[in-house]
Image (cartoon, grey):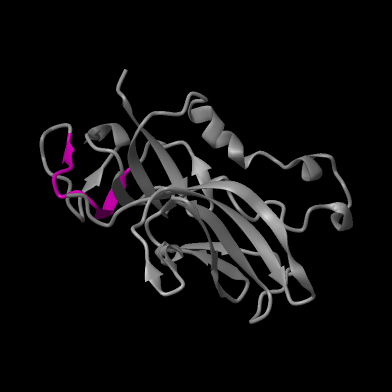
Amino acid sequence: MKRLVLFLLLSLGISFVHAGNFKVLFVNDASLKYTNGKVVKVGDTFKSAEDINWQKDKQVIKVFDLTAKKQMIFLGKEWTRKSGLDALVSSKRLSTNEAAGLPEDQQDPFMGIFEDEYLLLDPIEIPVKESIVLDDKSHFEATYDYGDTRLTKPLKQKGHTVILDKSIFAVDGKELDPRDITISIDYISADSPIPTLAKEKIEVTYIPDVIE
């Protein structure tokens, strides 16, 4: 069995790679080839992720699915999780509150906003419920450990959308070397000085624009 496997991350979630015709929009490794030996180039079309000869961790192809009319990301990633691919897909299951059928006023207001895992290539726009205030005094922030230091970074916002992008590695005027991180996201409200946990243990996989 190949040590390299693929999983597909949409901008708001994770799902299986499916059959279809894909047009290449971006590739981060100039040496990436198809199984027939041809180099993968922007503008190419191919039928399946199995058509690609994945050789390196974090090789990425951004594509347009000509059938579903959606942009997607294919990631070649060495398999290290013991729990298997099913565990990634299961992150989309209903939360306990929603599954229990609780009234809206008894549900977690941040339920279902953030995923368990993100691929950080392009900026990721995350819609937020209209009931959650986002303005100059109310916002979300991400906290993560970088070496021996715990860092907190306010997340960008646009209307009722939170933006997760590579600027998360620019903290207090310092540009950090990007890496894979695990973040917790808190909500900061103008009405309360105490942060409210929105979601913890979110895995963020950094994808370089270019692989040497």
Q: Position of residue 171 (x, y in %)?
A: 45, 68
Question: Who's the residue at 33% across and 58% down the image?
Answer: 177
Return the residue nearer the eye: 11 or 168: 168
Return the residue nearer the eye: 115 or 53: 115
Q: Residue furthest front?
A: 148
Q: Does residue 185 sit above or below 134 in this rendering?
A: above
Q: Position of residue 130 (x, y in %)?
A: 72, 69
Question: Quick check: is 61 in the magenta stretch?
Answer: no
Question: Who's the residue at 13% across and 44% down the image?
Answer: 31
Q: Residue furthest top?
A: 1
Q: Does residue 163 sit above or below 71 in this rendering?
A: below
Q: Does residue 208 sit above or below 193 in this rendering?
A: above
Q: Position of residue 69 (x, y in %)?
A: 42, 54
Q: Residue furthest bottom?
A: 136
Question: Quick check: is 28 in the magenta stretch?
Answer: yes
Question: Who's the residue at 24% across and 47% down the image?
Answer: 45
Q: Which residues are magenta?
A: 21-34
Quadrant of the rendered structure where residue 116 is?
top right
Return the residue nearer the eye: 198 or 74: 198
Question: Who's the residue at 17% across and 32% down the image?
Answer: 35
Apparent side of residue 114 relative to residue 104 in the rendered image (left or right): left
Quadrant of the rendered structure where residue 1 is?
top left
Tell me how many marks there are: 0
Q: Position of residue 137 (x, y in %)?
A: 68, 79
